[in-house]
Amino acid sequence: MKKITFSLLTILITSFSYSQTYTTGLVEFINDGDYFYSAQIDVNPSLVTLTLNGPDNKYLGLGFDNMSMTSGGDVVIWLNDGTFKLTDRSFLGIGAEPVLDAQQDWTIVSNTTTDGQRNIVATRLPDTGNPDDYVFSTTATSIDLVWSFEASSTYSLGWHGDTRGATRQSFVLGTSNFNMPDLTVYPNPGKTRLNINLSVLDKATTIEVYDILGNKTYANTLNSLTNSINVSNWHSGVYLVRISQDNQVVTKRFVKQ
């Protein structure tokens, strides 16, 4: 398997104190030793955040509320047609190249590459008001996702071969009753210590840390408002820090240098 690290990766964290955020968590589409492609969708009442991670020399396609290239379905495709961009498109049916929407609604927040992998973070409104766009629910629900990339030709929107598939994922509550400002993770990026401060600790609170491939790196119970974890032996890269109370979860991104 290719070594996937994200040293010195800049991650933008939107620090609004929304009442509820629903997330698919990290969804691996393919991880076969040759290719790795994943996505995560986070939805709150005001914003959808899409994170894609895949080969940095291929187009990356992801369709919403579809298990195939059903005509009229909403799809985004990351490609390079002279400039790198995330294009907002609609399916025209199996075998047809998805057509560009009149309105391009996704905004690129972050676009980085490391060791042959590209990491893209983009945002848009849950309901753009455009008939071409899927309306993301802001409640616990599920979503069908269809994905692909071109294995044999760089950035070609031709036939994807076997590098495609579909899955159904559940949105689960991703933000606890304690709000984002109540939890601080620092320094970020950090080299030796990961410090976590809570403003209240009146319930059983646990921490789990996952790497970008979804492997659990660390797990423990938080017994004080101020906590410090030795991360000097962790590999450089991006980690998801999940703080849980009563099955409610706040997730922060941490970058280990």
Image (cartoon, rainbow, N blue to C red):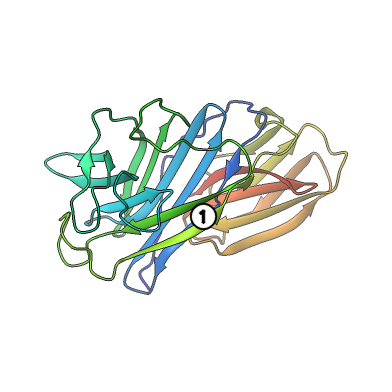
Rendering coords of residue 227 (x, y %): 74, 45
Rendering coords of residue 114 (x, y %): 32, 54
Q: Is residue 63 or residue 2 the one in the foreground?
A: 63
How many numbered marks have been drawn onto this rendered protein structure?
1
Q: Is residue 212 visible?
A: no
Report which quarter residue 245 is drawn in. Answer: top right
Rendering coords of residue 61 (x, y %): 30, 52
In the image: residue 18, left or right of residue 49: right
Residue sitting at the far right: 202
Q: Amino acid at mark 1?
A: Leu
Q: Is residue 57 visible?
A: yes
Q: Secondary structure at mark 1?
A: loop
Disc 1 residue crowd, few under 14, some 14–19, many 20+, Cα 10 Å: some
Residue identifier under label 1: 26
Q: Which quadrant of the figure contains the N terminus?
A: bottom left
Rendering coords of residue 173 (x, y %): 66, 44
Please determine whether, in this image, residue 48 is positioned above or below residue 5. Answer: above
In the image: residue 221, left or right of residue 230: right
Report which quarter residue 159 is drawn in. Answer: bottom left
Report which quarter residue 182 is drawn in. Answer: top right
Please determine whether, in this image, residue 90 is positioned above or below residue 219. Answer: above
At x 31%, y 43%, the residue is: 72
Q: Is residue 220 or residue 186 the one in the foreground?
A: 220
In the image: residue 178, left or right of residue 70: right
